[in-house]
Amino acid sequence: VQGRWQVGSRRARHSVSGRTCEGKNVGCGSGSNRLRDVGTFCTISLDQEEVFRTKVYEKSLSPFYGEDFYFEIPRPFQCLSFHVYAKSVFQREQPVGKVSIRKDDLCKYSGKEHWFALQPVDPNSEVQGKVHLEMKLNELITDNGPVSPRLQVRIIECQGLPLISGQNCDSFATVTLIGPARSDQRKTKVKKKTSDPHFEETFYFEVSRSSSNAKKSHFQVEDEDIEKLEIKVELWNNGNLAQDVFLGETRVSLKVLRNDVVHKAWYLLQPRGNGTKPKPDDLGSLRLNVTYTEDNVLPSSCYFPLRNLLLKSPDVQPISASAAHILGDVCRDRSEASLPVVRLLLHHNRLLPFLTSIAALELDNTQEANTIFRGNSLATRCIDDMMKMVGRNYLTVTLKPVLDEICESNKTCEIDPVKLKEGDNVEVNKENLQVYVQKVFSSITQSSASCPPLMCDVFRALRQLASDRFPGDPHVQYSAVSSFVFLRFFAVAVLSPHTFQLRPHHPDPDVSRTLTLISKTIQTLGSWSSLSKSKLHSTTLERESFNTADTESTPVRYEVKTVCLSACLSVCREVHKRAQGKKRLGKKNFKKRWLRVTNRELSYHKHKDALCVIPVKNILGVEKLDENTFNRKNMFQVLLSERPLYVQAGNCVEASEWIEVLSQVSRCNPGRLSNFHPSAYVTGMWLCCKETTENLPGCRPCTTYAHAQIDCDRETERIFSLFSASLPRLQKMEDACASMSVYLGQQKEQEEYSAFIIQDPKETFRTIKEIREVLEELKAQHADTEALTDHENPIVGKTS
């Protein structure tokens, strides 16, 4: 999934991740008994477009959601909203409250958990989009001679208006001149079925002024008059026989025309009214963890110096003096630093030597064999990220069948006497747990053939490093591997299958408890120290699995291929598909279907059986479809030899995901098209180029997609941002190197610098100097690009 939009010569890349944690006293202000007998769920929306939804949770005023989310943002937005809804079996979804965070405020809450008070859901405050206005004052000479001023307001267009009932709106605008004793209103024509209406209508308003100014040859509005007059523009959805729906407003004071010049600007639409809002009822609160990332990616050539410095890291001796390791030392959160480094090195086939070097460094600082790789170090974080990236397909093949069985059978496995429910039989529960554990453990120990080559290479290196570090301990070679593959990989996936896309949602409390017991047992079975003490028979299975992994030997050049294929093994979602071959427009041509893609085929289903199967090798391209084609948003087309397949996704995020996944699985297909039609062939012609020949080559070049999922320029930009945010700690590390190079320093200084790993002060100092040089160069290039962008794209005007 890639969210991006072009701004000048740079790409703006935005993503949101985090967790909907839990609610507290949800809906109490509306009556404490109202939600005791119904379930609740939470949604996430970009402006007013829903992009994520949790499952419905138990009847409780303080529900625990615990669902993680991550998505790239494929379009500009103003607000990220979390809505809580109540839903019973026989009732419609009823809004309880919401948390709205404006884009400009997301950075305040990024990366940390916060409790947010739920606010009432007011339709008049649910606005999005912007309006383009032009205003100027004209001089009008009347028949009687004196100059009469006239205000000219031109409403040009709007962009990003919300969907109404899932469809583009029928919008119109009202333009009103408001003063102390006047309110003159004009109205535009209705623009049908579009979220980006072009009005291009001009309205004129007579502006009164005092008679003392009547004989002035050049019109100039008095300051006191300007302060009292303003233009209000309201956007509405035409309800025909129903009530019109408010879409937003903006107010512009006439003081912007003091110098009698033309004023032309974009204005963000705002909620209705600007007065103080009444104090809402206590609707409860919602605990959220939201991380918002915004990267402005420059052209690839700008990142050569920093990228090359990072790619040299595996060859630097000692490894602690490398740029990648220094980033892990100075960054506030190692998890933020490790992921872009792992992605960048993985793409360039430099990850294995780097992981081997930092693992060796950690082992040198480990004093006891039973604490091997137990901390949250740069080495453990990087290996964690590597396993999650290249091992997703491995997890799906190994665990998904057995986890589906466990979640759907829902047998009780509780063995804690304190937590047993009335009627539970602890012996039956223990037997259920043993059966489940045996199935999961057998799936793991028999999965060595599916283990990705890179994981096998890393595990083999860990075994050798551990044996060299603790030659007197024959078990350490197994505990070095089990600390990752069992404790940090399989056990975590069993505990939270939804996090690894093994299940669609967080399991319910009973199933979650079962998975917790299985996960703890797997951790125990995977811990060599525990096994050696208890002498469990299953140690032979574990030894066999590691021996099998040790014999695997695949060149590292397959790493990137593994990442790409694992991400699109099987995707299935509900969409609206247009019937192929239809020549006319109409709602009946669109049917609700389940669309599924694997590495080999694309199919759509009404129920269980596929209605149509399209081999992936037959896909000639995947492109967006102009929304004006069928007056529907979030549409894309799968280009085939006979005719395109037109699909409407559920939201903008899903549309972006479908295009990315389908483009990745079909990127190597022979005969891919170089041009395409951005619209459809209906009523005897292509709506885009107006050509009447149906088999005419496309009128627009096809989009070029990268041949790997890893965007190296974006990862390097992320690393630049992390270094820039960590400059104070980088300075401390540089001071520590300088101090250690000259003299040992005082004890106080040594304690202050103990947070850094500095083996060779001179080499580390040299690397830090190189880092500073490339950061300064990149900073200057960002400033130049920003200045150029601001000149080419004026800032959007905001209401006063």
Image: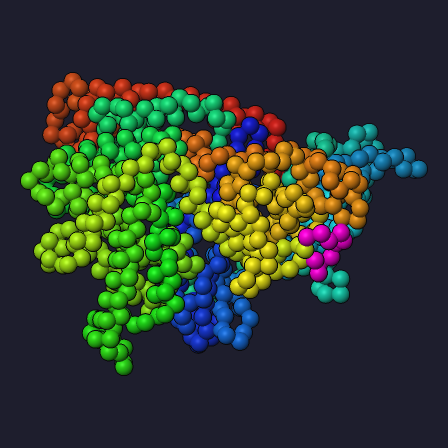
* Image: 432 above or below 290: below
> Residue 711, image x and y in percent?
45, 34
* Image: 345 above or below 634: above
> Residue 412, image x and y in percent?
30, 72
**Image check: 577 left or right of 347?**
right
Residue 581 colored in magenta in the image: yes
User: Which picture quadrant has residue 547?
Assistant: top left
* Image: 631 above or below 788: below
**Rendered-image quadrant of the C terminus:** top right
> Residue 76, image x and y in percent?
56, 43
* Residue 578 visible in image: yes
Which residue does the image show at 23% across and 28% down from the upper left? 320
Which residue does the image show at 72% across and 33% down from the upper left? 262
Residue 459 colored in magenta in the image: no
Q: Is the magenta stretch mostly helix, strand or loop?
A: loop
Which residue does the image show at 68% across and 45% down from the upper left? 642
Which residue does the image show at 19% across and 33% down from the upper left? 361
* Residue 293 visible in image: no
**Image check: 368 left or right of 390?**
left
Q: What stretch is highlighted in magenta?
A: 580-589
* Image: 326 above or below 742: below
**Image check: 327 left or right of 15?**
left
> Residue 487, image x and y in percent?
24, 51
User: Which picture quadrant has residue 283?
Assistant: bottom left
